Structures are given as structure tokens and as C-alpha cells.
Image (spheres, rainbow, N blue to C red):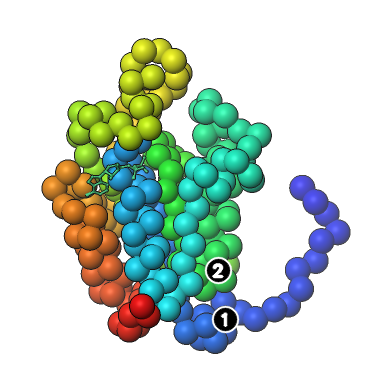
Amino acid sequence: MATNITWHPSLSRAERTALRGQQGLTIWFTGLSASGKSTVATALEQHLLHMGLAAYRLDGDNVRFGLNKDLGFSEADRNENIRRIAEVAKLFADSAAVALTSFISPYKADREVARRLHEGDKEGGLPFVEVYVEVPIEVAEQRDPKGLYKKARAGEIKDFTGVSAPYEAPDKPEITIRTDQLSVEECVEKIMEYLHEKGYVRQTKEIK
Ligand code: ADP
């Protein structure tokens, strides 16, 4: 723990939110590999950006190769991976942006840590919207866009979620999307409906 650090007084979150005209929040996608997290999160991010909102997606590509490049896939490393992602997402949300995270995040306890970090902070909390991207494993395995299930079944990847490592489905996610039943656009619509209902996004304009 660093000592001798003093926090500089700055704008309150409420002031920042009012000045930006946007509610900060985190949309946390969880689900099996190939369930559709990145596809839906990317489509949603684009939709939000076209509405003129600040939105940014954290995913394996921009986190695993940078901030978390020292981490592997053991349980301890996965815990730390998610903890850091949650802290970064919270910073984006605190800046009055929409943070979207698309990681398998297979452990309930880790997702709970992420939720508590958002909901329980001293400035009254930030919304944490858990989106369970649900598909039967057979569907995910059939899609297998990166050939990972095939490798995992052949024993070439150890600790692969759904094959040789557990996936703990959320009990009470804010939203569940079945990507084997809804199109990508319908999944985005379902999430947008929720965000509007909660008053987290107000703008309706589309910037082409
Ligand atoms: P994940 O990020 O969960 O590993 P990806 O988004 O990378 O998953 O891959 C999901 C695959 O499933 C993609 O090839 C995508 O085109 C396909 N897919 C089919 N239908 C859907 C849908 N309704 N929503 C999201 N992905 C879908």
C-alpha cells in the first residue's frame, strides 16, 4: 500500500455527471467463450457512440496484451485479471462514460467483487449492469470462431472454461440474452431498452 498520497479535491461525481450530461455506468458481459460477448458488446458500443455518448469496451485484446500481460489463466490469475478490469471499468464509469467489458469472467465471486466495487463506493455508487450472454455449450462449441474448443478438447489448452474449467452462471443478472435465439441487433435492443427504462441513457438522437 502506498503511503503519503493525498487525494486532491476535484469535482464531485454528481458535478461531473451534470457537466457531461451522461450517467457513467459499467455493462459487464459474462458468458462462455463464443457465446457472443464481444460481438454484442461491440455492436452496443457502436450504437452508444452513434448516439453521441462516450463508451469504451475493455476486452481481451486491449487488456490481456497490456495492463494484464503478466497474468495467465490459473484461478488466481483469473481473479486478479477480473479485479483489475473491474477497477479500470469503474474509472471509465466514474468519468461519466459507459464502460463495456467482455470477458468470460466465469467465477461468481469475482463478478461480485466487480459489482461491490461499483455499487458500494463512497460517492453513492455507480450502476453495474450484468449481462449474461447465454447459449448452450453445444452452440458455443459449434461456433468456435477461434478454434479454441477444438484445441481444448484435444488437451492443447488447459483450464478452458466449459471444458476443463467451470463456468458459474449468474443467479440474478440484470439482463440475460440468448444469442442462439436473438439476432445481434435484437440483443442490443434488449439492452438499450433496459438502459432507457432505468434512465441511464436519455438521448435518442443518432449521429450518422
Ligand atoms: P465471445 O466474445 O463470447 O467469445 P464472440 O462474440 O467472439 O464471442 O463470438 C461469437 C460468435 O457467435 C461470432 O462468430 C458471432 O458471429 C456468432 N453469433 C451468432 N449469432 C450471434 C448473436 N445473436 N449474438 C452474438 N454472436 C452471435
Is 119 in front, or is 90? 90
SS of the residue under disc 2 = helix
Which residue is at 24% across, 51% downward?
A: 176
Measuring 83% from the left and 54% from the top, which residue is drawn there?
Answer: 3
Quadrant observed for ligand 1 in the rendered image: top left
Apparent side of residue 181 relative to residue 158 in the rendered image (left or right):
left
User: Which residue extends farthest bottom?
Assistant: 19
Which image quarter: residue 105?
top left
On the question of residue 130 being in view, the answer is no
Q: CB under 8 Å between callouts 2 and 1? A: yes
For disc 1, the marked residue is 16
Three-letter residue code for mark 2: Asp
Mark 2 surroundings: few (<14), some (14-19) or many (≥20) residues within 10 A: many
Is residue 60 depicted above or below 24 in this figure? above
Marked residue nearer the N-terminal end (2 or 1): 1
Q: Where is residue 197 in the image (x, y as percent from the top left)?
A: 25, 74
Left or right: residue 193 versus residue 2 is: left
Q: Compared to 164, does 176 lie above or below?
A: below
Measured as percent of width and height from the top left, residue 91 is found at 58, 62
| Outermost residue, front side | 208
Estimate the spatial distance between the alpha carbons at disc 2 and disc 1, rounded to whole Å. 9 Å
Q: Nearer the viewer, residue 28 or 152?
A: 152
Residue at image location 61% in from the left, 33% down from the top: 71
Q: Which amino acid does label 1 sit on?
A: Arg
> Which residue lies under the disc numbered 2?
94
Q: Tell me where residue 119 appears, x and y as whole percent.
A: 46, 61
Percent x, y of residue 38:
38, 48
Task: Indicate the secondary structure of the residue bearing disc 1.
Answer: helix
> Vertically, is 96 above or below 136?
below
- Mark 1: few, some, or many residues within 10 Å (few <14, many ≥20)? some
The C terminus lies in which quarter of the figure?
bottom left
Q: Name, please, the residue furthest toward the top.
A: 155
